[in-house]
Amino acid sequence: MNCIIIDDEATARAIIEQLCSNVPSLNVVEQFPNAIQAIKYLNQNEIDLIFLDIHMPDFTGFDFIETLKNPPKIILTTSDANFAIQAFEYDCIVDYLVKPILPPRFEKAIQKAEAQPVKVASSPSTESVESTSGNDLYVNIDRRLIKIDIPSIYLVEAKGDYINVKTETQNYTVHSTLKKIEDKLPNDLFLKIHRSFIINVDKIIDIEDNSVLIKKDVIPVSRSNRPELMKRLNLL
């Protein structure tokens, strides 16, 4: 397999190249200190496998993957173990190696790459919140479509690359954005009251100063969103 190495650290590139040299089926054709140079190369050349670091200046490994229309197989090589769940949302990623990389673990990753056919990468944000049908919202969790009753949702909270959907019976952590789910929820029932929160207006228990109480959750209301919230209330 022809492969390239993308890592901003020269030492890391040298180590991966050395590991590759011990595998007869691998041929390292190029190395790049950043994703931009690699993109230019891939516009004119086809390769079978990429060893890709996640944390790089200006352009992360995930940003790089998003630019590829038909990505080859990718093995992530990183010192950060916190992105493993996000990584496997992409079908083109065949393995996730945490530095320092030991030869047996490296060889296992190559075996996976050799056994897995190339697939088209899919963006987590386009897969996780799938669709609405009547009063139902379907979300993608662990590659299963879970049906959620929309009126039962009382709070949606953004947490980094995820959203936490709270319902009357269960909470769901979904890899998506607040904007995406906001577009799926009915405007007459839900309102974004803060950059990190969407609430079901019908579930409000009380409002005090710049916060609302729903169930046991005290949710902040931003100054810019407070006027719209007050409009939605049936004030006496």
Image: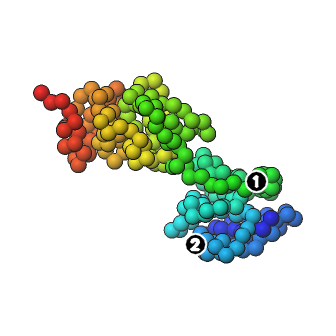
Q: Report x, y in % for residue 8.
A: 61, 69
Q: Which residue lies furthest to the left in this view?
A: 236
Q: Which residue is drawn at 22% across and 42% down?
A: 228
Q: Which mark is residue 117?
A: 1
Give the structural element (helix, strand or loop) at label 1: loop
Q: Report x, y in % for residue 170.
A: 47, 27
Q: Mark 2 points at which residue?
A: 36
Q: Residue at x 56, y 60 (%)?
A: 66
Is residue 229 or residue 81 the one in the foreground?
229
Can see residue 55? no
Q: Residue furthest top?
A: 169
Q: Residue at x 64, y 48 (%)?
A: 88
Q: In this view, does 38 lie above or below 191?
A: below
Q: Which quadrant of the rendered structure holds the N terminus?
A: bottom right
Can see residue 144? yes
Q: Tell me how far mark 2 sits from mark 1, CA to CA.
A: 26 Å
**Residue type beneath disc 1:** Pro
Q: Which quadrant of the rendered structure holds the C terminus?
A: top left
In this image, 8 relative to 160: left or right?
right
Q: Residue 85 carries which label?
A: none
In this image, 153 relative to 116: left or right?
left
Tell me which label, 2 or 1, sits earlier in the chain.
2
Mark 1 crowd level (few <14, some 14–19, many ≥20, 10 Å Cα):
few
Give the structural element (helix, strand or loop) at label 2: helix
Give the quarter of the image for residue 23. bottom right
**Residue type beneath disc 2:** Ile
Q: Is residue 203 above or below residue 164?
A: above
Q: Report x, y in % for residue 208.
A: 21, 33
Q: Which residue is drawn at 55% across and 46% down?
A: 127
Mark 2 crowd level (few <14, some 14–19, many ≥20, 10 Å Cα):
few
